[in-house]
């Protein structure tokens, strides 16, 4: 994200989620749009969100599993925007992916016995419901310096849960294949 920001307006133009460009063959934008930000405050908030995810759930998954969750969430979130929001011309930011990372990490932590996991998961769900009913949280538009696409948060959360289920299935399959056979 920092490298994209250092790349300036040209990098943002080439990498942001742009519906027309994606449908014209620039499919990478489905993922790279999450790396582009509206400005310094938007970037700073997303970096802070990434640190928060790491502090709350960083130990819940192996780094390779985090990679699967990150890549899967970014891809699925971008595809959901493309399919379910045909009127969305452009999008930038990591917040949708952050919602997915947080839920995936918290669910993995919950499964591993993290006591606070149900509370954190519940707070995320309450926030998502709030946004679907009432729109962005008060002050968020001013904080990021532009429009907030709350559906990206919802699609990101769903994408993160789906990506975590893939990791969970892989864990189960790996354990089953490692068990001794009679």
Image (spheres, grey):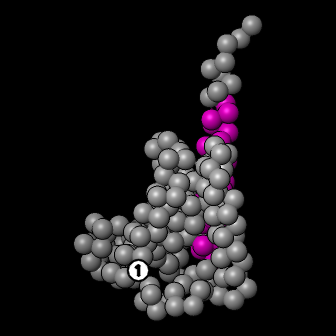
Position of residue 175 in the picture relative to residue 44 (left or right): right
Q: Is residue 167 one of those drawn in magenta?
A: yes
Quadrant of image for the C terminus: top right
Q: Residue at x 45, y 87 (%)?
A: 143
**Quadrant in the rendering for residue 5:** bottom left
Q: Residue at x 55, y 70 (%)?
A: 96
Which residue range is magenta in the image? 151-173
Q: In front here: 85 or 142?
A: 142
Query: Which residue position holds label 1?
Result: 42
In the current view of this chain or complex, which residue is farthest to the top? 182
Percent coordinates x, y for residue 116 in the rendering: 63, 58
Percent coordinates x, y for residue 33 in the rendering: 45, 70
Is residue 28 shown above or below 112? below
Position of residue 91 in the picture relative to residue 180 (left or right): left
Percent coordinates x, y for residue 97 in the rendering: 53, 65
Percent coordinates x, y for residue 10 in the rendering: 29, 77
Q: Residue at x 25, y 72 (%)?
A: 7
Is residue 5 shown above or below 133? above
Q: Please tell me whether mark 1 sits on a helix, a strand or a loop.
A: helix
Position of residue 76 in the picture relative to residue 122 (left or right): left
């Amino acid at each position: 994200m920092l490298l994209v920001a250092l790349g300036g307006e040209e990098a943002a133009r080439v990498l942001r989620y742009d519906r027309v460009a994606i449908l014209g063959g620039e499919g990478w934008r489905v993922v790279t749009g999450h790396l582009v930000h509206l400005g310094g405050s938007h970037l700073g908030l997303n970096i802070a969100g990434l640190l928060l995810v790491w502090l709350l759930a960083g130990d819940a998954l192996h780094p390779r599993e985090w990679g699967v969750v990150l890549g899967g969430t970014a891809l699925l979130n971008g595809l959901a925007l493309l399919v379910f929001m045909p009127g969305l011309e452009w999008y930038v930011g990591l917040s949708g992916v952050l919602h997915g990372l947080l839920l995936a990490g918290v669910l993995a932590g919950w499964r591993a016995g993290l006591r606070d996991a149900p509370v954190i998961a519940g707070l995320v769900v309450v926030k998502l419901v709030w946004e679907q009913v009432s729109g962005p949280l008060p002050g968020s538009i001013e904080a990021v310096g532009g429009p907030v696409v709350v559906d990206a948060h919802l699609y990101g959360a769903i994408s993160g849960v789906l990506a975590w289920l893939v990791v969970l299935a892989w864990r189960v399959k790996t354990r089953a294949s490692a068990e001794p056979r009679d």
